[in-house]
Structure formats: C-alpha cells, structure tokens
Image: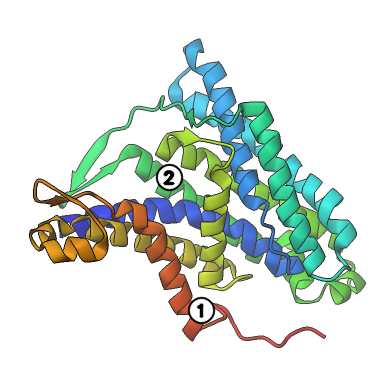
Amino acid sequence: MDTFLQQLVNGLTAGSVYAVVALGYTMVYGIIQLINFAHGEVVMIGAMVAFTVINALAPGGLPPLVVVLVGTACAIPVCMLVGYSMERLAYRPLRGAPRLAPLITAIGVSILLQHLAMLVWSRNVLAFPQIIQNTTYTLAGASITSVQIAIIAVCIALMGGLALLVYRTQLGTAMRATAQNPHVAGLMGVDVNRVIAATFVIGAALGAVAGVLYGTYYGVAQYTMGSILGLKAFSAAVLGGIGNIPGAMLGGVLLGLVEALGAGYIGDLSDLCAYGWIADLMGEQCDGGHFILFGSNYQDVFAFLVLIVVLVFRPSGLLGERVGDRA
C-alpha cells in the first residue's frame, strides 16, 4: 500500500505536467487539425529561459520564490513570441496545403528550435537551480514534497483557468466556433486568423509554465528535453481524445499514473531474483540476491502500451467523439 500511495503521488505530479503540455497540442489540433510537433521545443525554451534568469538572479539575495516567479514571468512572453512566430511564419502560409505539408513543417520547426537552443545554451545537461526549500511531508506512509504540492496546485489552476477561458469568455466562444467551422465563423464576424494566433500564444504560455515546473521538479534542463516530453504529452492528448480539452487533462494524469505505478511495481520485484530463471528470462542481472532496479527504465513502455491498448479498442480516445471526416 505504501508503494501504491507513493507512486500515486509521483504519478499525479508528472501527469499534471503532461496534462498542461497536452493542452497545447489539443487546442491547436482542435482549431486547425494540425499536430504541432514543435510544441515540446516551446516547453524546452521556457525551461531554458527560466534557467538563465534564475541563475542570474539567485546570487542577488532575492527570496527564492520571487526569483522563480520572475524566471517564469520572463519565460512566458518569450514562449508566446515563439508560438506566435511559428503560426505566422511557418503554419499560416500552409493552411490551405495538404495536411502532410504542415506536418513536415512542424517537424522541421522542432529541429530548428532544438539546434538554436543548442547554440545558445550548449548541448550539455544543465542543472536547473534548486533554490526553493523542499520540505517533505509524510501522509499514510507516502512522502510528498512542497514542490510536488505546488506543481499539482499550479497545474490544476492552469487547467481550470483554461477551461474558464474556453467556455466562459468571448475569445473562447470564438475559438469553439472556429474549431467547428472556420468559414462559417468568419462569416459571423470572427477574425479567424486572430483566433488561431491566440490559440498558439495561449498554448505556448502554458508550455512555458510547464517547462519551469518540469525543470524545478526533475532538476535538469537540456536542449533535447522537449522531444520525449512533447511525445508523451501528445500521447496523453491522443489518449484522452485529440481536440478534446477535458480529454487532454484526463489523458495526461492517466499517463503519469501508469508510468509511476508500472515503474514502482516492476522496480519492487527484487524478491523474484531468488528464482534465477525469472531473471534470465527478463534479461536482468542479479547482484547479491536483488534485482538491479529497472522499473524506471521501462516506464515509457507501460505508458505507450496503455496508449496502444486504448487506441485499439477506442481509436477516438477516452473522451473523444466519433465525427465524420470533413469533405
């Protein structure tokens, strides 16, 4: 039970970050049916900008929380500018092109942003500043830190704020109208280009915050960090139902839970090493009667295995709806 509760906490923390990043994918796809594979690099840029600002301000004697907030406040507009630039320069000219063209462009933009980040911040793995005091609390045998609590709370606030924006504001109404039929929305007075650009900007802002949270939680940042994080977030969006905002939230949390629980329970199979044939079968080595911990190395397998199973039996995702293809 202790293992279950501990991995539940870890899974909720990681899953909350996945959910916030997945919102950027699902919003863009819901509006223009484009899979923005460069969104993970936007998250990476947010983490890198915050890393630079926090490193510059940390020795100045400011309170650690203020330093992190200032770093986040600097990362958000930079990522918003990157998101807007991608939409305006790379995707808008291809809006009427076959779907394969913007998809390949998105991959190209992703590679471009990665290499620009490598030139600015180097190819090395950077230690993200851990300046906030991390207090550990024990609850029912599970440990949860103040950073984990803050990450979960911030992600819930971001998801709730986005839901209010989409379903309770004029911009949100315009976004939903554009998602249903951009041509009719334009005839009704909706500035479609402005709505699409706003969608990219909002998604980039969420990605910036997610990048800071990811760096704060794991303590590392690198120019390639957006690749696997973006892939997992995209998988979470597909798992919940691509284009469905509540589905992206659900998919992200579920993906984090599956990763954590799978890694936790597989990692606890050390007692099985007494049976040498099991160790040989699984290709693992034993040392002193214990399994070498390998659950964390296979956590991605569990996540994508669940994704495959869900898509086999429900291709539209958990909360996705079956809709007819557009003519």
Residue 144 appears in the rendering: yes
The residue at 50%/63% (across/down) is 249
Q: Residues within 10 Å of mark 1 (few under 14, many from 20)?
A: some
- Please state which amino acid type lies under the numbered disc 1: Leu
**In this figure, which residue is indicated by the disc labeled 2?**
151
> Is residue 64 rendered to the left or right of residue 26?
left
Q: Nearer the viewer, residue 293 or 152?
A: 293
Identify the secondary structure beneath mark 2. Answer: helix
Q: Nearer the viewer, residue 176 or 37?
A: 37
The residue at 66%/48% (across/down) is 204
Q: Quadrant of residue 179?
A: bottom right
Identify whether 127 is placed above or below 286. Answer: above
Identify whether 200 is placed above or below 168. Answer: above
Q: Determine which of the numbered discs, if any, sits on residue 167 in the image.
A: none
Q: Determine which of the numbered discs, if any, sits on residue 311 in the image.
A: 1
The residue at 66%/41% (across/down) is 114
Q: Quadrant of residue 253?
A: bottom left
- Count the labels in the image: 2
Residue 160 appears in the rendering: no
- Please state which amino acid type lies under the numbered disc 2: Ile
Q: CA distance from mark 2 to mark 1?
A: 29 Å
Q: Nearer the viewer, residue 212 or 315?
A: 315
